Image (tube, grey):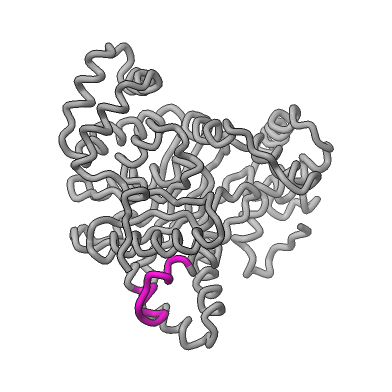
Amino acid sequence: MEFDYSDIRYYGEDDLKPALERVIKEPTFSNICNFMTPGISKEDAEKKVLSYTKIKNFQVDFILKIIKKLISRSITNLSSENANNFSSNSNDKYLFISNHRNIVMDAALINHELHAAYDKDFESTAIAIGNNLLGTPWIKDMARLNKSFVVIRDSSVQKMLENSIKLSTYMRSLIMEQKSSVWLAQREGRAKNGNDVTQPGLLKMLQMSGSSDFVENYGNLHIVPVSISYENDPCISNKVNELCAIEVDGKYDKTPMDDYNSMYNGLMGFKGRVHINFGNEITKDVLKKIDEEFPRKNEKIKSLAEYIDGFVHKNYKLWPKNYVATDIINNDTQFEDFYTSEDKTHFIKLMADKIKDINYDEKLKQDIFLKMWATPVKNSFKNSDKYKFTF
């Protein structure tokens, strides 16, 4: 089946100049240039931006510099493990699937660490991003210049199936035709409750474009699980408010500015320490074991999702506040070796500050806030008999 990818694909070299000419006309773009180079004149900023003739140069010299500036402003320490475990051969591409906590920074930081590991051999991953985040034309241009492709989410059931097949085929073609590695979140939307779980539906979408069996369909995508952990969440108050609304009212009605504010706060807000752990590629041997153990297709996909989750949970970097929250919920001190009394005092003050302006029941707010931090601990130790959890 042939598809027209023009509405979802990331930009190619022919798109670079017209996209940049559109972007520099936006008043907000001047703010970005001033953020990167304080005091730069509008004329010099435009001249600099329009001088790029290759997308990779624009990514490395412009986008990556913005990310580095954001890191210096909002992250106290960025660390990663195993970023250099992958082939630098341009013919080898991967599908990186990570947990999802920050709309923009998850993929940006993963690419930052891959660039640090491979330098001149660096090829950024293509990035899956929902069309709900691309309502502003210049943001859409910037995203697609940064190798973001569009996931269309607002469509009819019939159209949704067609879009899923098209998206699956597009991603498979990027990887198998050796154009680009791909980053994909393990679920639609961020894990606002702290529970990082791969949606089986996402894995089903990936196999829609396959023409072979379970092992070949997923093996040819070279899936790599990635676990990313933030010490602080700059969007946590909004997340608690949303989860409270869902708990009390059964729904949360987004305003047009919600997604924009989440992107902005996620970029600019303080994140503390951040750690990224890259897993090994899920080999065909692993997939073969899953294939042989489970007879039904849905069971195979569920097992693959659990395999990805297992890596994310086990390799999620737990911070002192994760352990503090867990002990508070459990009304216990079983994790007290992982934090200090100062850590606990700071966390309690943080919780009070972040939920004070949320207009819901105090106990409900506290429970939701605590579980957001404690759930990763429960997931990390789910196969251990050493610790007990009451939630």
Q: Nearer the viewer, residue 110 or 6?
A: 6
Give the residues drawn in magenta, as a range.
205-219
- Side (left or right) of 129 relative to 362: left
Q: Any magenta on residue 309?
A: no
> Which of the 4 image quadrants contains residue 66?
top left
Which x, y percent locates residue 374? 67, 51
Looking at the image, which residue is at 68% across and 40% down?
253
Q: Nearer the viewer, residue 230 or 148?
A: 148
Which x, y percent locates residue 143? 36, 39
Which x, y percent locates residue 192? 62, 47
Q: Quadrant of the C terminus?
A: bottom right
Q: Is residue 383 visible?
A: yes
- Side (left or right) of 236 relative to 334: left
- Image: 247 above or below 260: below
Q: Any magenta on residue 218?
A: yes
Q: Nearer the viewer, residue 33 or 119?
A: 33
Looking at the image, which residue is at 42% across and 41% down?
78
Q: Is residue 317 visible?
A: no
